[in-house]
Amino acid sequence: MDAMWGDSTVKLRAENSARGQLFEEGNYAMFIHWGLYSHLGNKVNGKTYYGIGEWIMSDRMAGIPIGDYKQLAEEFNPLNFDAEAIVQLAKDAGMKYIVITSKHHDGFAMYDSEVSDFDIVDSTPWGHDPMKELSDACQKAGLGFGFYYSHNQDWTYPGGHNGPDKKENGESASFDDYFREKCLPQVEEITTQYGPIALVWFDTPGEMPKHYVEQLVEVVRRNQPNALVSGRAGHGLGDYQTLGDMEVPHHNIDGMWESVDTTNNSWGYAWYDENWKSPREILNRLISTVARGGTYMLNIGPRGDGSVPVRASRVLRVAGQWIQSNPQVIYRSGPSPWGHALPWGDVTTNGNTLSLCIFDWMPLDRLYLPGLKSEIKSAHILTPDGPQAVPYSREGNWTIFTLPSCAPDLLVSVIEVELAGPPDVDQTFGLDPLVGTEILAEFAEVDGAEKSSLRWMEKFGEWVRLTRIHEWSPDSTASWEVDVIHPGEYLASLSYAGKGRIVWGVSVEGGEHIQNEQDSSHNYEEYPIGWIHFPEPGRYRIHVSCLEDENGEASLKSIRLVPIM
């Protein structure tokens, strides 16, 4: 399914341009997947189908015939839809714009379309245009508003990708028929009938020919010159890059880009899905996205009656209260100069100020920050009673902050560090002497093995991604440079998958070598290899080798080094 996302594009930031200013400065948005599929909630004829709700019609899910699916519109009556309540939820959550599905792959228009009567006004007993109500509410509240539109796939219109190949009169239908008769006119509608649009979010271009995408982008440019076009328009014609679904990257990415995520596991409403992200997890993923240089768009899936699940509303509002108290961490903030997360959390920037965001408060009294070269003017921890000065000291390449005994914030605690100039940072991974450090395979230098990305679904549409090192030979190595502040013994553990018996070796360049035999699992699991010694403070290069692999399937995800004494 990821192949349907098509090629994205990365454009350079343009802070002074009108187009994209909201995207650049807001860094946080609400995605809404709501449609005819929401009425089913992933249950068809008494059977529950597990996976993303908006694909329920597909053969990969329930395989609902077109005629049966269209008849569902007669039952779709979202009497509990409240546009102003949804907009207020977005504001309370700290989000700066809303993007909602105007037409998903099922072809059902969630607005009053003159092009097709398979829409929420003409085909349902409700007869309202929720897009009009939502756009008006956004304008009134000062939020940006945008549309999702599935431009390539249409499962119910003749000629649409994965749709019927014949018209009602029996004639063959081409993609050009679908494009001219439905797609292009509907994009004309959504960009002319709903006031100012901040963004048009096209999706799954697949192998859609370039000249069709060019026409769609031209319509957006003509009708909404200040609107952004998503990277999933295809053929590099979007204004920014959209990563894969549910993907928060581990390294900084240049240019304008977004991560799209969900409050639970599904995009469209699924009756059984109560696996909600906690407020802390939402903030962690939001801050991590901003720290990598991106914008975070978090989805809700209203029920078929139009109501938003209470638990989704609750977690968004709790996270929003934190954002209201710490706006400088999110809004107009730049990426971390470290280029990756740190063992205790992450960092965003505003000019010469660092926001050190502590995700897991340690029951200790110090925070170790590696590699900061810039002079510090001041450091304060943010508390409910206001900023309080934090003592700090320097030791080699490290800055050490003395912390209060209790976390000032139960979700994410923040230390604001004002620098004398722009941040200057050595990005070498530091081995934290208190909590240890996990270093991912994607940051390794690899010799004689392969490093590649791997994606799979836990359930249909729920993506997991990692970078792995595989195709090992006895002479292969993966290595990382690390900075050690406290010498001594560290436990080295490896996270890997494989089959059968595997022997791993871990060594310090010019120093100690350890190795151990382990069984393995097809799942990635962490296994201890043994203790390894760093004799003094300084820089070291750590090497990992796969010495024996009886089935040739060893796949390394990361190394973790935790201080022992």
Image (cartoon, helix red, strand yellow):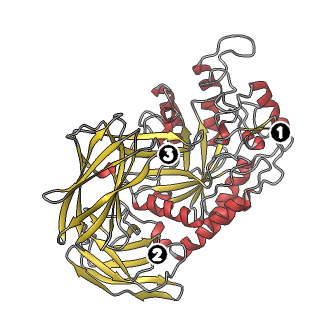
- Look at label 2 and name its amino acid: Trp
Tag 3 residue: 464
**Could you say where residue 92 lies in the image, as x and y percent from the top left?**
64, 68
Which callout, 1 or 3, points to the residue nearer the camera? Answer: 3
The residue shown at (47%, 66%) is: 330
Task: Indicate the quadrant where residue 156 lies.
Answer: top right
Which numbered disc, 1 or 2, marks the residue that appears first in the sequence?
1
Q: Is residue 261 above or below residue 412?
A: above
Q: Which mark is residue 361?
A: 2
**What amino acid is at disc 1?**
Thr
Position of residue 325 relative to residue 58, above or below, is below
What percent of the width, then of the height, locates residue 195? 64, 50
Residue at coordinates 57% horizontally, 44% vertically from top-left? 462
First along the sequence among labels 3 and 2: 2
Q: Residues within 10 Å of mark 2 (few under 14, many from 20)?
A: many
Whether 70 is drawn above or below 395: the answer is: above
- Camera-side residue of 302 and 552: 552
Mark 1 lies on residue: 124
Q: Is residue 502 left or right of residue 88?
A: left
Task: Tell me the SS state at disc 3.
Answer: strand
Cα distance in 3D space between marks 1 and 3: 37 Å
Report the Cα–Cα distance between label 1 and label 2.
Answer: 51 Å
- Which residue is rendered at x = 70% and y = 53% of the image? 134
| Numbered tag placed on residue 61 in the rendering | none
Q: Secondary structure at mark 1?
A: loop
The picture quadrant where one finds residue 90 is bottom right
